[in-house]
Image (cartoon, grey):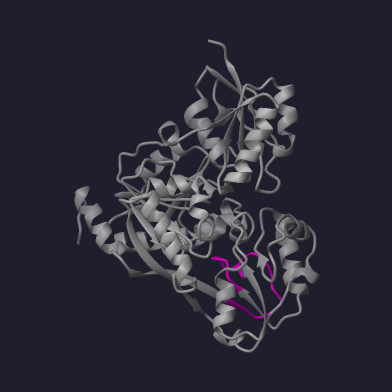
Amino acid sequence: METKNVIIIGAAGRDFHNFNTYYRDNDAYNVVAFTAAQIPDIDGRKYPSELAGSLYPEGIPIYSQDELPQLIKELDVDECVFAFSDISYEDLMGISAVVNAAGADFKLLGPNSTMLKSNKPVISVTAVRTGTGKSQTSRKIIETLLKQNLKVVAVRHPMPYGDLNAQRVQRFATVDDLKKHDCTIEEMEEYEPHVTRGNIVYAGVDYADILKAAENDPDGCDVILWDGGNNDFSFYEPDLAITVLDPHRPGHELKYYPGEVCLRTTDVSIINKVDSAPEEAVATVENNIKAAAPDSKIIKAESTITVDKPELITGKKVLVVEDGPTLTHGEMKIGAGSVAAERLGASEIVDPSPYLVGTLKETFKTYPHIEKVLPAMGYGEQQLKDLEETINNTDCDAVIIGTPIDLTRVININKPTTRVFYDLDEVEGPNLESILKEFIEKHHLQFA
């Protein structure tokens, strides 16, 4: 059989996993390149030979997705495999058209080709869009299981933006580990809320090796929790699948890939943020769940917000800094910081646009829907400097930090700051504790 030349279209996450699980040792295929999008500065690298395996002694180059049509021609490509997440069907099929117009086949790999099986019970937490509240859901699940004296190890969807060899398997147990692994702000946003609560988190590049390490964690492991990224489906075969939906973006659960896959394969659907979304939007999401996943249990939940220094918001001119991916490819215009500013009566939410410097100017051009909030972009040293300078340039009384990390730990802010925290509180339907009790009993784990 003739070997097929393949390009994997990705964003430094699902693309590497698809390669590792489906292509790495498969001599029916020759992966000639990866392409990269969504995340700044991840192209121009190589997927290293140490990770790529014996069929790829030189490693595999990573190009910008903009070069895709030219690469298909130059590298005599037979098929392109799409492998990143949180993309509208319109944009997805637009990429398919580019691939087909250049002469190649367009392919999507599904769960049966890419999911790994654990020897521990697995709970997956996924979503239909970025910024729905996966992390707070994961935290609540972990805290509930820890109260039953169970050892829970979280495995986070990949964000390998640095040295791929060094990031093959990463274990985070303390805040110091974030510095040790040179984490970006996006990584810290996901890992820090876990480790500050004493939870162990694994992430990296090779999720088969990561799974082995998590199953054999030195502190013990009774349950693996898959803490998903964007709206990707789990890398591990779940024994209990939980999907979070956002009524601030009603209908998106049926319009974005692969979020609809998460919805259609879920056991439990959580409609989050019902306290801040219109009733008709919540109803739209609920009806779509019933149509796409009729056997799914439905929980309605509030994203409960607390603020450490509310006096810095009431009656003040504030700059709101929100979670970066939620605003950028998640397409949200607001986040928890914006909700806090409104509820606590800020006199003005200051538009950061006049104060933007460097790479943040490009971010606002790329994502024109962003208006009076500032995404916490920090994928590299220059972006951190640009974020710091933009915040310090802004004419405001205080800065609301709506992103999950303590920004003052990584940049110097010359104004008073207040942090917004958010937790999941179920208000209608079965609660997570009862669902987890059934899970524990089914898998013969000890319930205290």
Q: Name the image quarter holding residue 213.
A: top left
Q: Quadrant of residue 53?
A: top right
Front residue of 266/213: it is 266
Asked whether 411 falls inside the magenta stretch, the response is yes
Magenta-drawn stretch contains 367: no
| Residue 411 placement, left or right of 359 | left
Residue 165: image x %, image y %? 58, 37
Choose between 117 and 367: the one closer to the eye: 367
- Residue 441 higher or lower than 49, as above or below: below
- Count up the numbered dots: 0
Q: Is residue 25 above or below residue 171?
A: above
Tell me which residue sits at (20%, 49%) in the image. 442
The residue stretch that appears in magenta: 401-418
Which residue extends farthest top? 1
Observer-nearest of 288 and 186: 288
The reply, left or right, for residue 217 in relation to residue 255 is left
Asked if residue 182 can be seen in this view, the reply is yes
**Quick check: 21 above or below 442?**
above
Mark yes or no: residue 199 visible.
Answer: no
Q: Residue at x 39, y 38 (%)?
A: 212
Quadrant in the rendering for residue 341:
bottom right
Q: Main secondary structure of the magenta part?
A: loop
Asked if residue 234 is positioned above or below residue 249 in the image, the reply reads: above
x and y, in percent, of residue 249 in the image? 53, 61
Residue 17 as seen in the image, left or right of residue 383: left
Point out residue 12 in the picture as x, y percentages from the top left corner: 60, 42
Q: Quadrant of the C terminus?
A: bottom left
Q: Position of residue 443 (x, y in %)?
A: 22, 47
